[in-house]
Image (spheres, grey):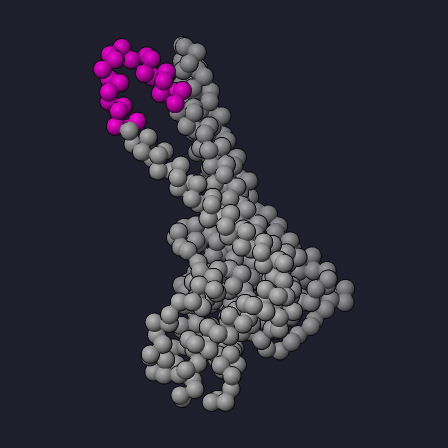
Amino acid sequence: MKETEFRLDGKCSQDDLYRETAATYGVALDRLAQAYEADPEIRRDLLQEIHLALWRSFEGFDARCSLRTWVYRVAHNTATSHIVRQRRANAQNFVGLEEVESLPDKNGDDLAADQANALERLLKLFQRLKPLDRQVILSYLEGMDAASIGEITGISPGNVATKIHRIKNILARRFHRGGRDG
Amino acid sequence: MASEPPENDIRSKWQNQPNETTRMSIEEIRQKAWKLQRKARREVLVLYGFALLFVVFFGMSFVKANDTLSRAGFALMVVSALYFPYQAQKRLWPRSESTESASTTGLDFYRRELERRRDYWRHIWGLLGPLFFSSGVVLLAVLKAMKNPGLWLNLLPFTLLLAIWAASFIPLRKRELRKIQREIDTVDALRS
């Protein structure tokens, strides 16, 4: 991921900041929404909600953090609100990375044949994860380092490192055997 | 590809996946913001509209009632009918949270959502209480006014159902509260 450290110089308007964000992070935001909502129709609404939240937020952008941190915080928080609301409606329970790591992978034997579906399975995994674990794994996949992940999520560096270690284990176990074969 | 570490392989797959791009112009965003605000206000106004119907109905019953118990019951029903939309308004009325959302880390934001859920379960009797209490008073007044005491038996199935609901709701509430508290503790542990 391109490391954009765009900072406000006090001259950008709310609309300018939004345009800059849509151009730089639009595609990443599409991926983020995918990780939070499986249904394409509801996902479109969620994405619009995220864009709207971002535009509104730029009214008070104070450059105390980088634009990237600001954008991801707003996007993750809006999406977290969405899944908490959905969970209330569906009485769905989420699992943590620790539980996922200890679960046997049902698809393990079919990985070589299934590699093409890796993204699909990755999305299914995201949609089962607790909000904070989802934020960490998504930020990690977007190429962020532990410090940036900590800044966005508020999780201490030690805990971010532990979570990244778990994520690597999960990814290696569940998503790579097929890649190595192919 | 074969020599790449697994995480880089899946990272590049993730970042290079084909995606359905959603773009919104500034004008579309303004329109959406305006529509959302209007929708939330409309929902609250509809609730107040229904509340007004209840207020008129129970208000008229209050005027017509002869005994103190009935009057107290109907007066409480009027208050309950107004209390519910007031609570809904607090939740639904458009607020400006986006800037706050940007200065809040994912952890703090999620904790606040959990606290909100915990408070909802904690104070659920406070929300339902006025309605139950006023209905009880009205029911008592109706029963008192009944000439034939045998008619009391007609209310038995309803009372039984209410008792079963209450018996299952109390442990459910406790379980839900415990679950949320556990999650809050887990979130807090991630801070240090």
Q: Residue at x 61, y 61 (%)?
A: A155
Residue B181 in view? yes
The residue closer to the viewer here, A128 or A2, is: A128
Task: Tell me which segment is drawn in magenta.
Answer: B136-159
Q: Residue at x 40, y 88 (%)?
A: A181
The residue closer to the viewer here, A162 or B70, is: A162
Relative image position of residue B154 (x, y in whole percent):
24, 22
Residue B181 against residue A114 in the figure, above or below: above
Q: Is residue A53 magenta?
A: no
Q: Residue at x 50, y 41 (%)?
A: B120
Q: Residue at x 54, y 67 (%)?
A: A163
The residue closer to the viewer here, A53 or B144, is: B144
Residue A113 against residue B179 in the figure, above or below: below
Q: Is residue A173 left or right of residue A148?
A: left
The residue closer to the viewer here, A106 or B154, is: A106
Residue B164 against residue B27 in the figure, above or below: above
Residue lying at the far right of the rendered structure: A10
Q: The C terminus of chain A lies in which quarter of the figure?
A: bottom left
Q: Main secondary structure of the magenta part?
A: helix
Relative image position of residue A103 (x, y in whole percent):
40, 67
